[in-house]
Amino acid sequence: MDIELAQGDITTWRVDAIVNAANHTLLGGGGVDGAIHRAGGRAIVEECRLLRADRYPEGLPTGEAVATTAGDLPARWVIHTVGPTWAKTTDKSELLRSCYRTSLAVADEIGAATVAFPLVSAGVYRWPKEDAIVQALTTLGSTPTAVRTATLVLYDEPTYRLAEQVAARLA
Ligand code: AR6
């Protein structure tokens, strides 16, 4: 799989699937989740409501992923995953890596060949950006998948520059 870095608003990405840094409720929130729900329209929240009623009455567990329509977005699907919140005293990085692995597994199930990821957990959930980038790139680079291209979309310029530095160090 090719792994690319890009900067911008993931809701504008024309790929098979974009990943959403969601929360357990699947019903929207702030950050990239809010942006996806605003730009994607009612169809996403309607499908999320059905998923909550049928498959996830208690909510989507941290580290897992599930796909819905992308509604009005240029992508075909949204893959919702729930990252862990950052905690100084507990190492939750396995859950963060699980978000990338399970999102790729869902992409394989639905036949998505191109997938764009945000930097899961690195906003409202306060994961330090540099480590979030390391977890993202190392997990994407080591997960067997039929996905052809994974793009890590960094929202702002400083985070994009940081991701370039981390990628160069890991290469
Ligand atoms: N495109 C790309 N990246 C974005 C965009 C965008 N449009 N908007 C924000 N980011 P966050 P989390 C970046 O907070 O930390 C929500 O309320 C942002 O700069 O979206 O996993 C959910 O409902 C950061 O680097 O997700 C949950 O409750 C990264 O995306 C909670 O926040 C992730 O930031 C999830 O928190």
Image: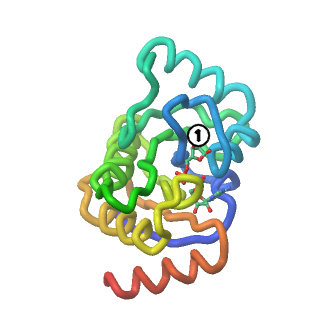
| Mark 1 neighbour density, 10 Å: few (under 14) some (14–19) many (20 or more) | some
Residue 150: x and y in percent read 44, 60
Q: How many numbered callouts?
A: 1
Residue 31: x and y in percent read 66, 51
Residue depicted at x 67% and y 45%: 30
Q: Nearer the viewer, residue 138 or 146?
A: 138
Residue depicted at x 50% and y 20%: 51
Q: Which residue, given by chain and number where applicable, does mark 1 sit on?
A: 76
Q: Quadrant of the N terminus?
A: bottom left
Residue depicted at x 31% and y 55%: 90
Q: Nearer the viewer, residue 48 or 29?
A: 29
Can you say whether 150 is above or below 79 in the image?
below
**What residue type is disc 1 on?**
Arg
Let me know if residue 11 appears in the view.
yes
Residue depicted at x 38% and y 33%: 61
Residue 15: x and y in percent read 57, 52
Q: Quadrant of the C terminus?
A: bottom left
